Image: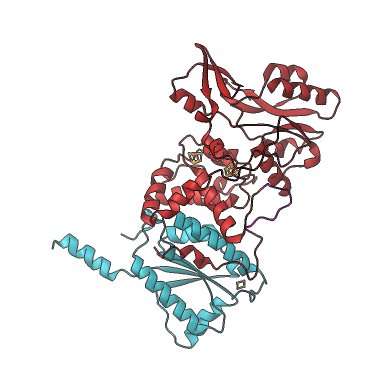
Chain colours: A red, B cyan
Amino acid sequence: MQRELINRARELLADGTVDRVLGWQAGQFAYDITPAVFTDAGELEAHFVYNEFCADNLSKYLIKESEKEGKVLAFLKPCDTYSFNQLVTEHRIRREHVYVIGVESYGKADVEKLRARGISGITGVETVSGMLKVHTMYGDESVPLNEVMLDRCLTCKSKKHVVYDELIGEDGDVVADSGRFDMVEKLERMTAKERFSFWQGELSRCIRCNACRNVCPACTCENCVFDNPGSGLQNRAARDNFEEKLFHIIRAYHVAGRCTDCGECSRVCPEHIPLHLLNRKFIKDFNELYGPFQAGEVSGQMSPMCAYTETADPEASVVRKGGAE
Amino acid sequence: MSVMEKTAAARQAEWKPKIIAFCCNWCSYGGADLAGTNRLSYPANVKIIRVPCSCRVNPMFILRAFQKGADGVIVCGCHPGDCHYSTGNYHARRRMTMLFSMLSFLGVESARTRVEWVSAAEGARFKAVMDSFVEDITRLGPNERLEDLRCKEN
Ligand code: SF4
Ligand code: SF4
Ligand code: FES
């Protein structure tokens, strides 16, 4: 796969279709993947990687890249294409400046799950007939990919590329039974008190590193409320448990109706806070109260936060329908 | 009963909820005014904050109200179809529904938040709404799940 991608990128650079290539390269370690821009064949050959560690959603980088002159080639996984569409909808990506190649992905590996199996000294990774082959300094190890996948990939909502100029590999389908709302439902069935202590335990670990916000392709404001010195919450850890909640409610609320459920926020959180549950609660509520909606499914959709109806919308008291706890 | 316990119990008995009511200028604030001129007394622990329209209420306002010591927060606007700016209350309805649902998901008691539509002609309704909201909050007791301890009086 990586070879095919490099070859195609070289062709498109050579024939002038694109001027730059947005892809992935290894950081200090092989599993430390970072997005990168390549401008010639030499750089591609030397640094470009595409493997089971390439989890990073590249769409957010296209905001800056597509503002520049010329055309950029972007390789997008199925989940990244949803973010791409959403950003085009919000006029944050200049579509005509991007050449999109959809790349297949059957799930990305979680290095921590590999470590938990005692695999260390990782130097590379590839899929060989359904098994994840991990190259290490001590030899190769084979593990079933689905046992070491990122949590977000275990509840993947779609293997379909919703936008592309060309595809490399196969296009999949929307996954109807992803089970991604199961945990939200479980929480909904608890009492308010139980939910409160669940979230207290989760949110109090937040160190306000802002990684969740920085990685999020829906969080793209130039001036974020959390950077505003007047907000009283500028870039610092929470002082009490009110502030812990404030940050998380507002972060999730600001992306509600725009969050595509790409899972990047939970993936990057160093404290393993299940931020996706907050996002999915909003998604589930939108689906149930105002009809099915998937952000980024097509470009040009109106957010359910704005698409009110005069007579069909339930009153806010629906929130209390489960009992006024 | 020790002295300490007595004071705690006494404090509990004396406790009156603090309620913040965001009222839109064109309808609900008028409704509150009418309740006043008609000498319909609504609970004194309801503090009204006048906003131009119900959709002016940012989710941060609600959270800040709780932070600064509110035990319940209610948003009041014109009845659907009557908003002075035509559609503000339709936006407010969705936004507040989503916010309140999230608060409930985090374990904040869902009866602490409400949206009610009150017109400028409904002084009696304004009183009734506030009476029932205060009653709900009194039953729930002080807000402890969204409080900022530094903002407490004692
Ligand atoms: S990434 Fe995690 S620790 Fe960092 S600010 Fe977000 S929730 Fe908090
Ligand atoms: S909130 Fe999280 S899941 Fe949603 S778009 Fe942002 S990073 Fe992706
Ligand atoms: S002016 Fe009253 S709700 Fe908009």
User: Which residue lies at the image location 48% right of the left edge and 88% below the top edge?
Assistant: B38
Q: Position of residue A207 (x, y in %)?
A: 45, 39
The answer to whether residue A46 shows anywhere in this view is yes
In which quarter of the view is residue B12 placed?
Answer: bottom left
Q: Residue A163: say if magenta.
A: no
Total labels drawn = 0
Q: Position of residue A225 (x, y in %)?
A: 57, 49
Q: Residue furthest right?
A: A15
Ligand 3 image-quadrant field:
bottom right
Above or below: residue A188 compared with residue B52? above
In front here: B78 or B97? B97
Q: Position of residue A280 (x, y in %)?
A: 54, 48
Q: Residue furthest left?
A: B1
- The quadrant in which the N terminus of chain B is found is bottom left
User: Which residue lies at the image location 59% right of the left edge and 38% below the top edge?
Assistant: A215
A208 with respect to B52 (left or right): left
- The quadrant in which the C terminus of chain B is found is bottom left
Q: Main secondary structure of the magenta part?
A: loop
Q: Residue A297: say if magenta.
A: yes
User: Which residue lies at the image location 54% right of the left edge and 19% below the top edge?
Assistant: A134
Q: Which residues are magenta?
A: A296-305
Q: Residue furthest bottom?
A: B38
